Amino acid sequence: MQAASGRDAPDRCPGAVQVHAAADGGLARVRLPGGRLPAEGLAVLRAAAADLGDPALELTSRGNVQVRALRPGAELELAARLSQAGLLPSDTHERVRNIIASPLSGRDGAGLVDVRPVVAAFDAGLCADPSLAALPGRFLATLDDGRGDVSPLGGDVGLHGDRLLLAGAPTTARTCGFPAGLTTPRTCGDPAGPTVAGGWDDPAELLLAAARAFLAERASQGGTAWRLAELTDGPARVAARLAATVDTGIGRRDGGAGPAVGRTPQAGGPVALTVVVPLGLLTQEQSAALVAASPGEIIVTPWRTVVVPDVPVDEAGAVEALLTAAGLVTDPASPWAGVTACAGRPGCAKALADVRADARAAVAGGLDHALPVHWIGCERRCGAPKGRHVEMLATADGYRVVS
Ligand code: SF4
């Protein structure tokens, strides 16, 4: 019998260990909490892709990285390499480490708080709790530092500044664990709204409690829901389990925008360089250029861009030249800034077209569109960007434009 959520089976999202059998071979998804990837980790991924599967790394709409076309059994070698590089801290929890965070948090002064320590603490708490291995692979946490970039991306649980979100909706639950300096006045136990029982000193603990409340509510509803919004009255009932009630402090937003392509000044002088990865496919040459360019880490964003933070300003020109020469895009006016595509043929058996080749031809032919354009090989619409965009939908009779 099908559950109230409409799901009758657990999700089958791929992981790095539990790979998906795609038409072109094994598909492994490596979770990068907050998109953060040390340069040496990218070097490991690059080498693994070259040795074990398709040499190009695929960026996902959740800021993760995929290795495609793995040969049978190659996932074991991949897992060993990832473990050694520290990219696979838990075999049991690897599919549930779905954490998107404001990519420039703590660096450009635009947010209200620095969410980087919360990402690390939430990830560690997730992996340390055996019960949370039962979260679905689709379950998503968004940690927005208050600038409003990742809260609209459809998280199941999230923070927006110091406020808890459930299925994107604000609650009155607030955390006192952020350092002073929020631009909006607030106190723990905000008199403007009900407080969460017991108070929450630690933002990561608040998120972990919300994730456990989701599992408890799902169990009580007797289903296999993949997302909090699929539960009957999901946000309200999970909020009730946290002894909070929903108010309208933070609205849902349409879309959500990542860091601007190009240079963003950071506090203290360096710049963060945000580059577009055309079609989210990171070639061997591009990965090598990023490894060479990065002073420490790169940040994979949910918008198929990559940020190279902490670049000394007097080196920024040379770094941009290096990245551009490899085919990465530093010009915000480039048509690539608004073009995405699903895997399509030959990687996906459901695809009706080689959408990436067709998207490339369209860009080469002078594609010009006011809205982002997403190319898809079938009606499943994988990887569609949030917010308004135009779809190029492959059909048996050619492409249909859906806007
Ligand atoms: S949208 Fe269709 S063709 Fe594209 S990856 Fe998803 S299932 Fe495959």
Image (cartoon, helix red, strand yellow):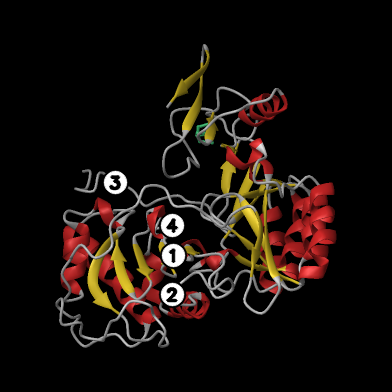
Dot 3 or dot 1, earlier in sequence = 3
42 or 8: which is nearer to us?
Answer: 42
Please state which amino acid type lies under the numbered disc 1: Arg
Left or right: 63 in relation to 316: left
224 or 40: which is nearer to us?
Answer: 40
Dot 1 or dot 2, earlier in sequence = 2
Please state which amino acid type lies under the numbered disc 3: Arg
Q: Position of residue 316 (x, y in %)?
A: 78, 63
Q: Position of residue 311 (x, y in %)?
A: 74, 69
Q: Residue tagged by mark 2?
A: 112
Q: Residue tagged by mark 1?
A: 147
Label placed on residue 7: 3
Dot 1 or dot 4, earlier in sequence = 4
Task: Rate crowding at label 2 as few (under 14), some (14 to 19) or many (20 or more) other CA atoms within 10 Å.
Answer: many
Q: Residue tagged by mark 4?
A: 137
Left or right: 79 in relation to 217: right
Q: Secondary structure at mark 2?
A: loop
The residues bearing labels 1 and 4 have C-alpha atoms spaced at a distance of 27 Å
Dot 2 or dot 4, earlier in sequence = 2
Please state which amino acid type lies under the numbered disc 2: Leu
